[in-house]
Image (spheres, rainbow, N blue to C red):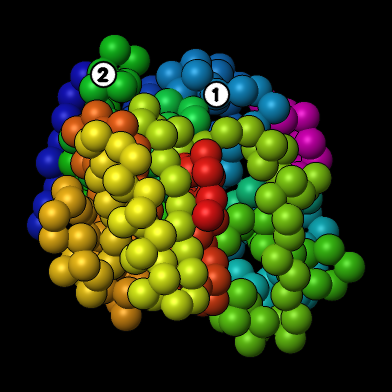
Amino acid sequence: MEILEIKNEIDETKLKEIAAGIKNGKLCLFPTETVYGIGSNGLEEKAVEKIYEAKKRNRKNPINLLVSDITMIEKIAQDISPLEYKLMEAFFPGPFTIILKKKSIVPSIVTANSDLVGVRMPSGTIARKLVQLAGIPIAAPSANISGELSGTNLKDVIDEFSNCLDFAIDGGESTLGMESTIVRVVDGIPHILRPGSITPEQIKAVAGNVILEKANSTFLPSSTMNHYQLKASCTLVYDEDNGKMVEKILKLAKNYTTPIILCCKENVVYYSKRQVIAIASKNHLEDYSKNLFSSLRKADSFSPDIILIEGLKKEGLGIAIMDRLENVCQTKI
């Protein structure tokens, strides 16, 4: 495996070599603005098979394709509606995935035998340049063993894939730290199948309406599968009254020997006699989102007998953060 470090200027010569490898079916781990991805040629069945095998991913769970421009989208998708174009114009490039009707050029393995394909145009410089240089859509799910936490930096995930990778690109920390918002337009209304950094309010401002689907949406096969599983047990605690939420967590902590509390910076002072990891300020949800997965990994690394996690109000970016936390936690209070 060859590792390329790109922290400042892009070495385009080296990136061209990696892009050519991806086009020829090689497997690469690389950064996007959301999380790190593991990818290969999205139009070659054998290349996509390598991704499923590396991630131990269920074949019923489709893989999104990364693209570099609208022309590439139109090569893989058909019957694109004016609203779908409008949404892409508003949110591409960025942390936004749209479900479109696929063309036959897209192998069935990518879409779990569906006639729909998830398409995303990353705004991360490295990821987008990689797709441009490869000249083909890159199949690229998050770089984690299926069911485990997504990775926001190379060191968190590279060991899991070291035996199967051809290339890895170290681009430092992902700027957003959370997977993309996934949307499908149904009967002229965008349905959010997975919340992310692009909020329902932003989508409604463009489309005039939006529906937040339940987690068991039939439009998203992966929604019935477990995500973000840690070794430690996790309990999510939320109350609109901050004082009551803190009291509940302190009361629960007394029942355990080695609890760890994940909270906002403002509440650290209330847990002074406990082991605490401050995720970010509750007034800066972008930082909260960026630090969430790394904070969960850190907490799990201490092998606590419980991880107690403060919840957030479900509005704006808080919807996406709570979606991830509800997947992590076995118990919600």
Q: How many marks?
A: 2
Question: In the figure, 119 relative to 286: above or below?
Answer: above
x%, y% of residue 188?
A: 84, 72
What residue sits right under mark 2 in the picture? 162
Residue extent of the magenta highlight? 103-116
The residue sitting at 17% across, 48% down in the picture is 275
Locate the N terminus by quadrant.
top left
User: Which element carries disc 2, helix, strand or loop?
Assistant: loop
**What is the distance, in whole Å, between disc 1 and disc 2 at their CAs?**
17 Å
> Does the magenta-highlighted stretch encompass residue 255?
no
Q: Main secondary structure of the magenta part?
A: loop
User: Can you tell which mark lies on residue 57?
Assistant: 1
Q: Nearer the viewer, mark 1 or mark 2?
A: 1
**Tags 1 and 2 in contact by the CB under 8 Å rule?**
no
* Amino acid type, mark 2: Ser
Disc 1 crowd rating (10 Å Cα; few below 14, some 14-19, many 20+) is some
The residue sitting at 69% across, 27% down in the picture is 60
Residue 12 visible from this viewpoint: no
The residue sitting at 67% across, 82% down in the picture is 204
* Amino acid type, mark 1: Arg
9 or 305: which is nearer to us?
A: 305
51 or 17: which is nearer to us?
A: 51
Extreme residue toward the right, this view = 187
Question: In the figure, 204 relative to 235: above or below?
Answer: below
x%, y% of residue 292?
A: 33, 54
Q: Is residue 21 left or right of residue 119?
A: left
Q: Is residue 236 left or right of residue 77?
A: left
Q: Is residue 144 left or right of residue 203?
A: left
